[in-house]
Image (cartoon, rainbow, N blue to C red):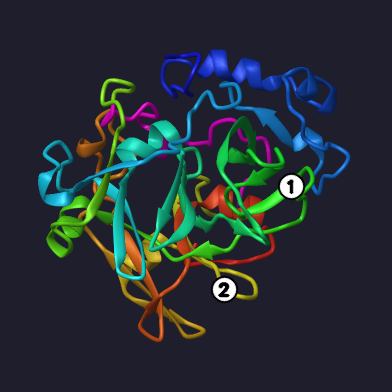
Amino acid sequence: MLTLVRIFVLSVPIVAAAAQAIADPTSWSREGWETDFSKSSVPFEEIISGGPPRDGIPSIDDPKFAAASAVPDIEAREPVIQFGLGGDIRAYPLRVLTWHEIVNDVVGGVPVAVTYCPLCNAALVFDRRLDDRVLEFGTTGKLRNSDLVMYDRQTESWWQQFTGEAIVGTLNGRKLKLLPSRIVAFSAFREAYSGGPVLVPNDPSFRDYGRNPYASYDSSATPFLYRGDLPEDIPAMARVVVVRTQDEPIIVTLDRVRAGTLERDGYRIEFEEGVASALDHSTIAKGRDVGTVRVTRDGRDVVHDVTFAFVAHAFHPDVPIIGK
């Protein structure tokens, strides 16, 4: 198990030691990558090993679903990614995505990648279509700013999960379209969509689904496998809401939203309680209540995620954090 996933509590020394060796195109090519390393928009030294090899954290490429009313083992407060297109509304439990990080799916007829990076607590959904291609994504085993680096199996270009941008390879500089999704409690999804599809493991014995391998991570003082600058005047692991606008994002602390609904530039950010942290207790269902948010504009959901302050600072260092 330790060779396949980043077990936060038990294997920090092992994984951290492995990550200290900075990889480069020569060593990456020896790993079997056929990526075009002559094309890159980030310094290679920013990309480090996260421990597992390519696809060591396996994406789900043939997802299996069950009706919400027929799923007995997910507790009420457990977090799920709620995502839908054209009336096809689905739930992707973090108890599953913690162990797989990427689901290649088709929702409402649209090929999508549902992604979750535990080290950044970033849950994002992308349209997998790019020009005349439909891309399929896997995990590289690499990290940048502690964030998952994905790759597409068509060109082996490397993609930053937090931005949806290709940072190395043939498709360097291209961006995937982000699609609105939100974290909700499983009970809220089940109440609204009792027959709605819920992602379930293809093989329930493949991983210890429901267990959090990053126990106590979101209450630690510093992020794991992160070597960049930390934000000032706010804890690195404080949760913040990042609203993806057409210009620069709006970033606001979760504590500020918890204190009352925030409206900014036409966007409305509301807090909802009753959702367990997936990165607290060793059993996800027992995680402390960190709540969640809903972000709308003109009554319609917009792209956002709830991540950590260090992540927002790493990718948007010049954007102020409201409420810090």
266 up-or-down from 274: above or below: below
Query: Between 107 and 168, which is closer to the camera in this rendering?
Result: 107
Helix, strand or loop status at disc 2: loop
Which residue is tagged 2? 245
Q: Which mark is residue 167?
A: 1
Which residue type carries mark 1?
Ile
Q: Residue 66: x percent and y percent?
A: 20, 45
Q: Residue 192: x percent and y percent?
A: 16, 64
Residue 306 vs residue 202: left or right?
right
Helix, strand or loop status at disc 1: strand
Name the residue located 69 percent from the left edge and 29 percent from the top edge: 48
In this rendering, the label closer to the viewer, 2 or 1: 1
Q: Residues within 10 Å of mark 2 (few under 14, many from 20)?
A: few
Quarter that holds the N terminus: top left
- Number of marks drawn: 2
Residue 316: image quadrant is bottom right
Q: Residue 7: x percent and y percent?
A: 44, 21
Residue 262 vs residue 68: left or right?
right
Residue pushed farthest right? 38
117 up-or-down from 262: above or below: above
Q: Earlier in the sequence, mark 2 or mark 1?
A: 1
Which residue type carries mark 2?
Thr
Residue 218 forms part of the magenta stretch: yes
Query: Between 204 and 265, which is closer to the camera in this rendering?
Result: 204
Query: Between 247 and 289, which is closer to the camera in this rendering?
Result: 247
Boundaries of the magenta span: 209-232
Q: Residue 220 carries which label?
A: none
CB under 8 Å between discs 2 and 1: no
Does residue 279 show up?
A: no
